[in-house]
Image (spheres, helix red, strand yellow):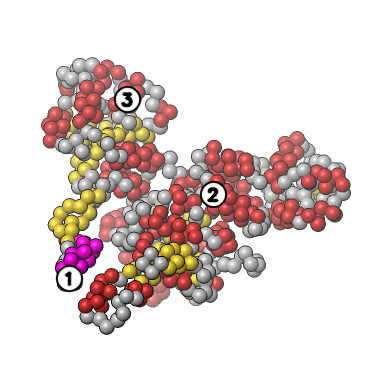
Amino acid sequence: MFTDFFYILRKNKVPVSLVEWMTLMEALAKGHIRNLDEFYFLARAILVKSEAYYDQYDISFQEYFQGVEAPEEIAQEVMDWLKDPLNRMLLGEEAQALFDSMDFDELMKELEKRLREQTEQHDGGGHWIGRGGTSPFGHSGYHPHGIRIGGQGGGRHAVQIAQERRFKNYRSDLTLDVRQIGVALKKLRQLRRTGPEDELDLEGTIKATAKNAGDLDFIWQRSRKNTVKLLLLMDVGGSMEPYAMLCSRLFSAAHSSTHFKDFQYYYFHNCIYDNLYRDIEREDAVSTVHLLRTLEPDYKLLVVGDARMGPWELVERYGAINYYERNEIPGIIWLRRIADHFSHCVWLNPDAPRFWIHATVNMIGRLFPMYPLTLEGLEQSVGKLVVKK
Amino acid sequence: MKKDSFAQFSGSEDYVTSEPLENAVNVSIALGRPLLIRGEAGTGKTLLAHSIAEGLEKKLITWNIKSTTKAQEGLYVYDTVQRLNDSRFGDKDISDIKQYIKLGKLGQAFTSPEQVVLLIDEVDKADIEFPNDLLNELDEMSFHIPETNETITAIHRPITVITSNAEKELPDAFLRRCIFHYIEFPTPELMEEIVRVHFPDIKDSLLGEALKTFYSLRKVDDFRKKPSTSELIDWIRALIAGGIPHKEVSKKIPFVGTLLKKETDYDLFVRNFADRRW
């Protein structure tokens, strides 16, 4: 039952596995779901494991049950009827054959089809949707197990709830707040034992004590600390202006994360040339060569920028957007030096990936693994930064 | 409310639920799977377990997770230090290892002669691998103690409620086995109901003003920690105790310290409130 719904969910990138699907089937088989509203909430509780996917779930739900309004009482009758074969005895032969050939979701589909075909109000009769007829759809009709349309309602129905899409803001592929970024950056850690020996090594103590013929002999060890050092380079000004807010969030999350062993950040405009800057106004310059010399290659490098510029700005001498910079070495060479120096680096691009088809974005993308600046992209890039090489 | 074997839980006297939440609780009980609850701080995630225990008249076992908690501690602890100590000074029979095996919260829940409600609070506080270490135990509801060659199997599957603040992402394998529910922040209507549960005698005028002020404060995006339900309850308690007339509530916002807990938020409030920006 509802197998198509499973595939629609997967198509909409809700990570549903067979384990969860079978759980839902179990719940259905045990009769825990009696109407479409309950189906909406319970299927969500069983299939969806993060509010980030609630919106995709709503969309899938709409897609599957589109145009279907099933007030709870009637839908329940359908379910009950499906469960109880005795009910079928009450039906005429024709109706029985019809119902035998359909399960609940087919019934819904059939309803949808007929809704589309019908363009006028219809009372009486045996096929169209209307009142007092014998079609399985409509209200006040003879058909005992039809799906009611309109008539008395009561509360909001599942499809309507789905249509509201209240969880749009929880989607993880949209923008981020500081805390979410902080959580993502938290994964950027490598624990090593460092510092003074101030943690009791219980195993070691027991072993030593046993060797010592039962006289207590305490063994101490160093505690585990995060050894990750982070370097953040951010493109500011110009085409990055619309993303200023997003970048400042990333910055404050990284800055307030206390667990890095070291955190350094520099700014640049458009592309990196001879200098990087300590401030957004780009007055306090540090030479790029100096940085490459002083920062060890084990700094994890995060570059944030749209990588979008005039091709000459990237590949030509004196290509810098600021005329007075007079760079002898083209930006692409600087970028290659940086990418070669650090063992782990990623490029976060605030532009959506569909805008990445651009000459300079492609060239930079070949130097740095590029990810969108979304929660998902950030998590992927953090994953890239912690892999052992 | 329906009262068949499936629909067991429908809130308790001092806890207001929504239908989706009740359904999620009931399906998790019926299928014997852990219920994972997520939501903003102060929306009553922990209280839910208390309410389930109270509503179904079952004992509640709470396992508070800290950053140092290990999965093993929930099962059992072999108190080797005590045994070592006894071997030197004690008069107990140290060859009986059983007396040094102390069951953890999970172990206690399994061995309880009656079905209990097990609350694993703030599971995301622990190490990233923590939930994975509990997978098998929560699945099979049994574990083995190698020291005594004993297998502890749950007499009754405990009703397991797990809360998370989403500080760390939980592993997929763990999620697959759970029923998930996200507690949304209550709407003003639901909030009114919640407040009335706590203060049945509250005057409508005071409640109205308090809720209005509360929701307008929540709209301020610059707060680092927006006030939540539990803060509202505290605040209203303070308002009632202080005998504040309802007209003054939105004008002066007395006892704002009960609503805003961070210093920076408080400063922001003081600075902007004078200008009446909101």
SS assignment at label 3: helix
Residue shown at the point (37%, 56%) measured from the top left: B130
Q: Residue B150: x and y, percent? A: 43, 68
Q: Label 3 is placed on what type of residue?
A: Arg
SS assignment at label 1: loop
Q: Residue A126: x and y, percent? A: 85, 43
Residue shown at the point (44%, 48%) measured from the top left: B172
State whether residue A177 is above or below residue A282.
below
Q: Mark 1 points at which residue?
A: A213
Residue B129 located left or right of residue B91: right
Label 2 marks which chain's residue?
Answer: A
State whether residue B28 is above or below residue B51.
above
Q: Main secondary structure of the magenta part?
A: helix
Q: Which mark is residue A366?
A: 3
> Of the residues under marks 3 and 1, which one precedes in the sequence?
1
Residue B22 located left or right of residue A344: right
Q: Does the magenta stretch include residue A206?
A: yes
Image quarter in which the N terminus of chain B is found: bottom right
Q: Name the residue under label 2.
A: A19
Residue lying furthest bottom:
B91
| Front one among B72 and A57 | B72
- Depth check, mark 3 against mark 1: the one in front is 1
